[in-house]
Image (spheres, helix red, strand yellow):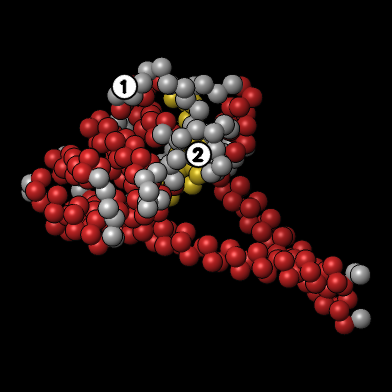
Amino acid sequence: MVFKRIGKAVIMGLICSVLVLSGQMNAAAQKDDVINEKLGVPIVVYGETLTNEQKDEVRKLLEVTNPENVDEITVTAQDLARLIGGNPKSRMFSSAKITVKEKGNGLVVSIVTPENITEVTSEMYSNALLTAGVENANVDVASPVKVTGHSALVGIYKAYESKGEVLDKDRMEVANEELSLATELANKEGLNDEKVTELLTEIKKMIAEQNPATREDVEQIVEEQLNKMNIELSEKDRQLLIDLFDKMRSLEIDFDGVKKQLEDIKGKLEEVVGDEGFWDKVANFFQKIADFFRNLFK
């Protein structure tokens, strides 16, 4: 009897948790239906290669429940070539939903389909978008098929362009170079997504603090961070990294203005690393619950 009462209590607790979570989700959905008359409605950008069925799937993934309350546009391979000098014959699947926020809210990037965005992480997107000049927004990225994820960046740029907020072309191109180099370095032996993103973030923070005046100054910052993180790169990769940040220096990108958001990226990286142990504990917890119920009803 005692075990049955405990079992009922556990079940009721789980039911209550589900109801509370459901209520929170419904509240969030209702909030999304409210039109922001100051900042405008969210913009949903679809890759031009999507079929009609895939486009409907992406709508669901990005929680576009009321198309009248969003602006829907399409990003093309021509946009890829026009905005960042990409291949005008590329196939475009990556899509995104951009909700502009008030100043001070920061940049939050979520990958809705991590299983289909194979190379770019949310932190990589955040880093590149900050370089391009995108600061206060919620960005959701999705794809119905497996893609690297690079074209979503262009879709986000076009979304801002559609609102009359034209981003600096040179900064967009450098941001694309950053994303390409980040995904390339992440595949090197001894490196991974988190370590590469941390490296890029730390270099930006040092640039914000030291305001390097020459390429030599940039090279010193890069070398210091590589040594600090015990990262060994080939001479070619090291020069690519220095070239990238020297371009950022020459464009006079104000990383000091987004230092808090760079700290947020680093904080998320630390959470990701810590989550490995956390999810093991969660799995063990639910395994114990399952074992309890199996024994209870034997």
| Residue 69, x across and y down, in percent | 55, 35
Dot 1 or dot 2: first in sequence order is 1
- Residue 267: assigned label: none
Q: Residues within 10 Å of mark 2 (few under 14, many from 20)?
A: many
Tell me the quadrant of the picture where the C terminus can be found: bottom right
Kindly identify which residue carries mark 1. Answer: 82
How crowded pointer 1 is (Cα within 10 Å; few <14, some 14-19, many 20+) is rated as some
Type of amino acid under label 2: Ile
Residue 270 in picture, x, y percent from top left: 42, 62
Indicate left or right for 240 with 33 as reference. left
Which residue is most to the bottom? Answer: 2
Which residue is located at x 40 percent, y 53 percent? Answer: 194
Question: Could you say where residue 134 lies in the image, as x and y percent from the top left?
Answer: 33, 42
Q: Of the residues tagged 1 and 2, which is closer to the observer?
A: 2
Write the residue at 55% across / 66% down.
Answer: 278
Quarter of the image holding residue 100?
top left
In whole angstroms, how far apart are the C-alphas of marks 1 and 2?
A: 23 Å
Q: Amino acid at mark 1?
A: Arg
Does residue 219 sit above or below 74 in this rendering? below
Regarding residue 23, the answer to whether it shows in the image is yes
Q: From the viewer's perspective, is residue 20 above or below residue 128?
A: below
- Which residue is depicted at the point 44% across and 25% down? 75
The location of residue 284, given as percent across then percent down, is 66, 68
Q: Quadrant of residue 14?
A: bottom right
Mark 2 sits on what residue?
A: 117
